[in-house]
Amino acid sequence: MTAQLIDGRAVAASVHERVRLGIAERLAAGLRAPALATILVGDDPASHVYVRNKRTTCEKVGIRSVPVQFGADVTQAELIGQVDRLNADPEIDGILVQLPLPPQIDATLVTERIRADKDVDGFHPYNIGRLAQRLPTLRSCTPYGVIELLRSVQEPFKGRRAVVVGASNHVGRPMALELLLAGATTTVCHRFTADLGAEVARADIVVVAVGKPGLIKGEWIKPGATVIDVGMNRLADGRLVGDCEFDVARQRAAFITPVPGGVGPMTVAMLMLNTLQAAALHD
Ligand code: NAP
């Protein structure tokens, strides 16, 4: 068996189209375009690339992009002050603070300062709590995007066994809550899992989000499973790869995401969808 590739760029493009249509409907109804403020701190090259991509996508879909930039020496008080101003601004629907933040900043404090109804990253404890209680509001972008990818290949979820590898606050944990919400029987594996191979081998759906190339052996994949690789690792030769041994896994899985071109484009697409949804919360 050779797995069918799940084309994240194509699914993301369809989400962009939904957002464009939603914005056109707002404008036709006399409402303003949604606005997203993106706060970038310091000179981390990867953060600059991510934020530029988010700002460009805003412009493409019709979201007003409000860029905010700070030097790496910004103080906690300055950053919190900026978040407070954006929280109070009735013309701003979403606030995104690009992580990581410099060591003098408490990222948890900043994340929790963003008003929950403007938290378009879906990281605020309120939004994670809503998801845990099966009442999702603004959902964490990457896990939400993974669900969208799975739906694009008619994943039934109910009666299926899902295994999430990685248990971070931003990806693994909300991913498990999303899969549970969708109806899959869900297991979370982390660095203390005794036999990762055995857990993965039982899974109909494998979602890997660790950041270690080759962690998931291709031969562990159950024949016919769906594999979603969230991992993004830059190798010494410059190649970008996921956490799963792609070539071997592809010979066993029914569906698999490539890296790049799988989950990556979905994270930004769901950010756009969340911003549109946040605007509706502010009408
Ligand atoms: P993270 O915060 O570093 O979390 C990684 C998680 O994996 C942690 O829970 C860690 O455990 C766990 N882990 C470490 N070693 C493990 C092992 N041997 N077996 C099982 N679990 C293990 O990273 P993240 O933010 O979740 O991101 C994970 C990966 O996804 C990274 O490669 C990142 O670049 C990528 N990513 C991609 C996108 C996208 O849009 N495509 C978005 C977000 C992240 P501890 O908690 O005990 O350390």
Image (cartoon, grey):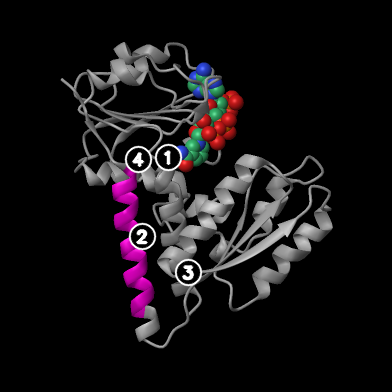
Front tag of 1 and 3: 3
Q: Which residue: 58% across, 72% down?
A: 92
Real-space CA distance between mark 4 and mark 1, rounded to the nearest whole angstrom: 6 Å
The reply to whether the magenta stretch includes residue 233 is: no
| Residue type for callout 2 | His
Q: Is residue 144 above or below residue 258?
A: below
Q: Is residue 62 left or right of residue 93?
A: left
**Magenta segment, which residues?**
8-25
Judge the density around disc 2: few (<14), some (14-19), many (≥20) Cα neighbours within 10 Å.
many
Is the shortest distance between ligand 1 and the CB of mark 3 under 8 Å? no
Q: Which residue: 52% across, 25% down?
A: 238
Say which residue label 3 marks: 63
Judge the density around disc 4: few (<14), some (14-19), many (≥20) Cα neighbours within 10 Å.
many
Q: Secondary structure at mark 1?
A: helix
| Residue type for callout 1 | Met
Q: Secondary structure at mark 3?
A: loop
